[in-house]
Image (cartoon, rainbow, N blue to C red):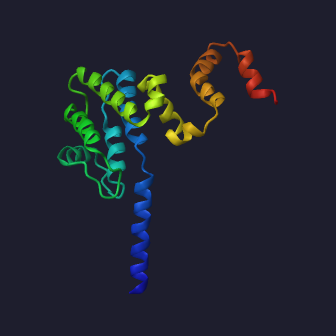
Amino acid sequence: MENDRIVGWNIEQSKKEIQKNLLKDNIIIFFTRILEDSKRYRKPNFYGRLKEIYALLYPYSNEENTKSIFQELKKSDLNSKEGLILNPQEKHFITLFLKSLDEDCKIIKQEKIKLIEKDLTKLVEIYLPNSYKLLEPYILGKLISSVGGIDNLYKMPSSTIQLIGAEKAMFRHIVRGGGLPKIWFNILFIKN
């Protein structure tokens, strides 16, 4: 009896700790990935993105069926007791996104993508006001997404961030048969 209470208390404390560690940068990453998908594919479906946001809001749910996840999210008030806690503005942005999807989880009208871009801009302006002044919100969201979060980005030296930005160009250069540019050769192979 006493052990059950202790185990229950430990589980509740663990859930609270997990909830505290779900950061708001996940919302920025979510909207950035939506924009990324819409730029990469002509008519993307957002099943995977719906699962992402559902897992953030309801981390202990066992629901796997995407159509039922979509229906649950549309009916939900997006108040989570165990997952990411959203403020009213974030709930509004996610609700607008859900309303812009058809039954196949595809964007109904392309004009909605512009609204999602505006929502991302507002979120970045709120949570990253200094970085917002320096970088475009979409680029900043991609950078945060690629390094795994805002905290990881803040801990990185500027040289590493430069390498992340130039990574795509480097691989494109190598694929075209150009070999490693001299600067990359120096960075990767010559020890200081």
Q: Quadrant of residue 36?
A: top left
Q: Is residue 40 left or right of residue 184?
A: left
Task: Determine whether 71 is above or below 46 in the image.
Answer: below
Q: Quadrant of the C terminus?
A: top right
Q: Say whether residue 149 is visible.
A: no
Task: Determine whether 131 is above or below 68 in the image.
Answer: above
Residue appearing at x 40%, y 32% in the figure: 124
Residue 64: % across, % down: 32, 51
In the image, 3 versus 175, the foreground residue is 3
Residue appearing at x 25%, y 52% in the figure: 79
Q: Say whether residue 158 is visible.
A: yes
Q: Is residue 135 left or right of residue 59?
A: right
Residue 102: % across, % down: 19, 32
Residue appearing at x 45%, y 24% in the figure: 133
State the count of labels: 0
Residue 3: % across, % down: 43, 83
Task: Determine whether 51 is above or below 21 in the image.
Answer: above
Q: Quadrant of residue 162?
A: top right
Q: Is residue 78 left or right of residue 10?
A: left
Residue furthest left as drawn: 75
Q: Quadrant of the N terminus?
A: bottom left
Residue 69: % across, % down: 26, 47
